[in-house]
C-alpha cells in the first residue's frame, strides 16, 4: 500500500483522497502500475485543477469578464472540484473558489456603482445640455448659437442613455429648444430679407436722383444735395448682397462725375485766387511800411490809396484770408489809434479837464505830505503810516494824470 498526506492507494489498487472532515473518498483505481505511479497520476489531475482556477482568477482580476460569465465558470470549476478524481487539497481549491466568488461579487458591486455613477454623470451632462440649449434658443447670435446647438447634438449622441422616461423627457426639452431657435432664426431672416428688399427699392430711387444730378453745374446746392443723399443712403440699410455692390457703384459713379467736374472748375478758381493772394500780400507789405506813423495825414492818404487797390482785387483762398486781412486791419487800427490820440491832444475841453484834475491831485498830494511830516514830528508813527499809504495812492493818480496831460502837448 502507498500513501500521501492527501491520499492513498490500497492493496487492491483503489485510490482515495482525504476529505475536509477527516474521512476519505474513492477517486479511482489503478491496476497498470505501482501505487506511487497511481498517486502521481491523480496528483497531476489535481494540478490541472489548480492551473484552471489560477487562470480564472487572473481573468477575473485583469480582464473585463462579466460577473455572469465569471460566476458560470466558477460553478463549473466547483463541480469539477467537488467530484474531482484527483488527489490533493481539494478543500483549499474550494476556498479559493469561494474567495473568487467574493471577488466577483465585489467587482459586480463596483461595476454597479460605477454604472450608477456614469448614469448620474450622464443625467447631469444631459441636463446641462438642455439648459444651455434653452438659453441658446433665446439668443440672437444666429451663427454662433446655430453652430453651438449642432455641437450639443453631437455631444448628446456620445452620452449613455438613461432610463427611457428620463431620457425621453430630457430629449423632448432639448429638441423643443432647437426647434424654437430654428423658428426664431427663420423669422428673423425672413424679416431681414423684407428689410433688404425695402432698402433696395429706396436705394434705386437714390441712385436715380444721383445720376440725374451728375451733370449739374449748380455746384453749391448740388454738392449739398449729394451729402443729403449719402445720409439717406446710410439710413436706408443694406440691400441684398447681389444688389448692394451694383447700386453702390452706380451711386458713387454719379457723384464722381459731378465732383470731378466741380474740382476742375475749382482748380481754375483756386489758381486765380492764389494770384490774388500774392497781390494782397504785396499790398499788406506796402501798408505795414507806413508804421510807425509819424505823419498822420500822409499815412492816412497812402493807406486810402492802398485800400482802393486792395478792394479791386478779387477773392483769395478761404484758409489764407484771415491772415492777410488781419495784417491790413492791424495797420488800419494803428491809424485809428493815431487819429484818436491826435484828437485828444487838440481837444481844448479835454485838455482843460486834464489840467484841472492834475491841479487838484497836486494840491491833495502837497497837503498829505505836510500831514505826514507833522505826524512824524509829533511821534505819531501809526497815523503817519496811514497818511503815507494815502499819499502813495494819490501820488500814483497824479503821475498818471501828468502823463495824460503830456499827450495834450503840456
Image: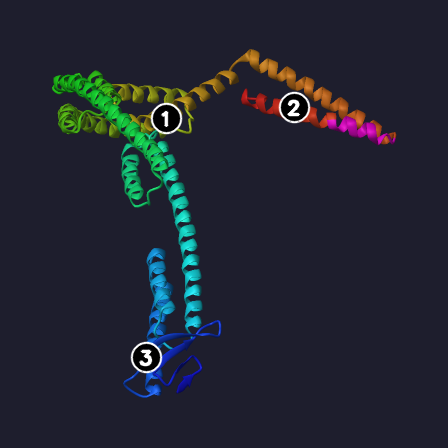
- The quadrant the C terminus occupies is top right
Bounds of the magenta segment:
379-389
Q: Is residue 72 above or below residue 166?
A: below
Q: Look at the numbered disc 3 and give the secondary structure of its residue.
A: strand
Q: Residue 131 carries which label?
A: none
Is residue 128 visible from the viewing direction of this image?
A: yes
- Kindly indicate whether the residue at mark 3 contacts the one at mark 2 (C-beta within 8 angstroms): no
Q: Which of pointers 1 and 3 indicates the residue nearer the eye?
A: 3
Q: Is the magenta stretch mostly helix, strand or loop?
A: helix
Q: Does residue 273 show up magenta in the picture? A: no
Which of disc 2 and disc 1 is earlier in sequence? 1
Which residue is the extreme one toward the top? 349
Number of dots carrying numbers: 3
Q: Mark 3 sits on what residue? A: 29
Q: Which of pointers 1 and 2 indicates the residue nearer the eye?
A: 1
Which of disc 3 and disc 1 is earlier in sequence? 3
Q: Mark 1 sits on what residue? A: 326
Is the residue marked by circle 1 packed among few (<14), some (14-19), or many (20+) residues within 10 Å? few
Hey, which quadrant is residue 301 in on the image? top left
Residue 353 in the figure: left or right of residue 335: right
Say which of 400 and 98 sits in front.
98
Q: Mark 2 sits on what residue? A: 397
Q: What's the residue at 39%, 39% (across, down)?
A: 128
Say which of 323 and 79 sits in front.
79
Q: How far across and down, in percent of the image, does residue 314 sit? A: 23, 21
Amino acid at each position: 500500500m502507498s500513501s500521501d498526506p492527501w491520499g492513498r492507494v490500497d492493496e487492491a489498487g483503489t485510490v482515495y483522497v482525504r476529505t475536509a472532515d477527516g474521512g476519505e473518498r474513492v477517486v479511482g483505481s489503478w491496476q497498470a502500475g505501482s501505487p506511487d505511479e497511481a498517486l502521481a497520476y491523480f496528483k497531476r489531475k489535481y494540478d490541472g485543477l489548480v492551473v484552471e482556477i489560477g487562470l480564472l482568477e487572473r481573468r477575473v482580476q485583469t480582464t473585463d469578464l462579466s460577473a455572469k460569465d465569471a460566476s458560470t465558470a466558477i460553478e463549473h470549476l466547483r463541480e469539477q472540484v467537488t467530484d474531482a478524481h484527483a488527489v490533493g487539497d481539494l478543500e483549499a481549491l474550494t476556498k479559493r473558489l469561494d474567495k473568487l466568488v467574493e471577488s466577483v461579487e465585489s467587482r459586480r458591486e463596483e461595476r454597479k456603482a460605477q454604472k450608477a455613477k456614469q448614469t448620474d454623470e450622464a443625467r447631469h451632462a444631459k441636463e446641462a445640455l438642455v439648459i444651455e440649449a434653452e438659453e441658446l434658443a433665446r439668443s440672437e447670435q444666429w451663427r454662433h448659437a446655430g453652430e453651438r446647438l449642432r455641437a450639443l447634438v453631437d455631444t448628446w449622441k456620445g452620452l449613455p442613455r438613461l432610463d427611457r422616461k428620463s431620457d425621453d423627457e430630457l430629449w423632448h426639452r432639448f429638441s423643443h429648444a432647437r426647434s424654437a431657435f430654428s423658428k426664431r432664426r427663420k423669422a428673423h431672416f425672413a424679416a431681414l430679407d423684407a428689410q433688404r428688399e425695402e432698402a433696395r427699392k429706396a436705394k434705386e430711387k437714390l441712385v436715380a436722383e444721383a445720376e440725374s444730378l451728375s451733370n449739374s453745374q449748380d455746384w453749391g446746392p448740388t454738392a449739398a444735395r449729394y451729402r443729403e443723399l449719402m445720409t439717406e443712403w446710410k439710413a436706408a440699410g443694406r440691400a441684398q448682397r447681389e444688389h448692394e455692390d451694383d447700386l453702390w457703384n452706380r451711386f458713387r459713379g454719379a457723384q464722381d462725375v459731378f465732383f470731378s467736374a466741380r474740382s476742375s472748375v475749382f482748380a481754375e478758381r483756386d489758381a486765380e485766387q492764389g494770384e490774388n493772394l500774392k497781390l494782397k500780400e504785396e499790398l499788406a507789405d506796402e501798408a505795414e511800411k507806413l508804421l510807425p506813423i509819424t505823419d498822420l495825414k500822409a499815412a492816412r492818404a497812402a493807406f486810402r490809396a492802398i485800400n482802393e487797390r486792395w478792394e479791386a482785387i478779387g477773392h483769395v483762398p478761404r484758409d489764407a484770408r484771415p491772415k492777410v486781412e488781419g495784417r491790413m486791419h492791424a495797420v488800419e487800427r494803428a491809424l485809428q489809434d493815431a487819429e484818436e490820440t491826435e484828437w485828444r491832444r487838440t481837444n481844448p475841453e479835454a485838455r482843460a479837464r486834464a489840467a484841472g484834475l492834475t491841479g487838484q491831485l497836486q494840491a491833495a498830494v502837497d497837503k498829505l505830505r505836510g500831514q505826514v511830516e507833522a505826524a512824524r514830528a509829533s511821534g505819531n508813527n501809526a497815523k503817519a503810516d496811514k497818511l503815507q499809504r494815502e499819499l502813495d495812492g494819490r501820488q500814483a493818480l497824479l503821475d498818471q494824470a501828468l502823463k495824460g496831460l503830456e499827450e495834450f502837448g503840456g
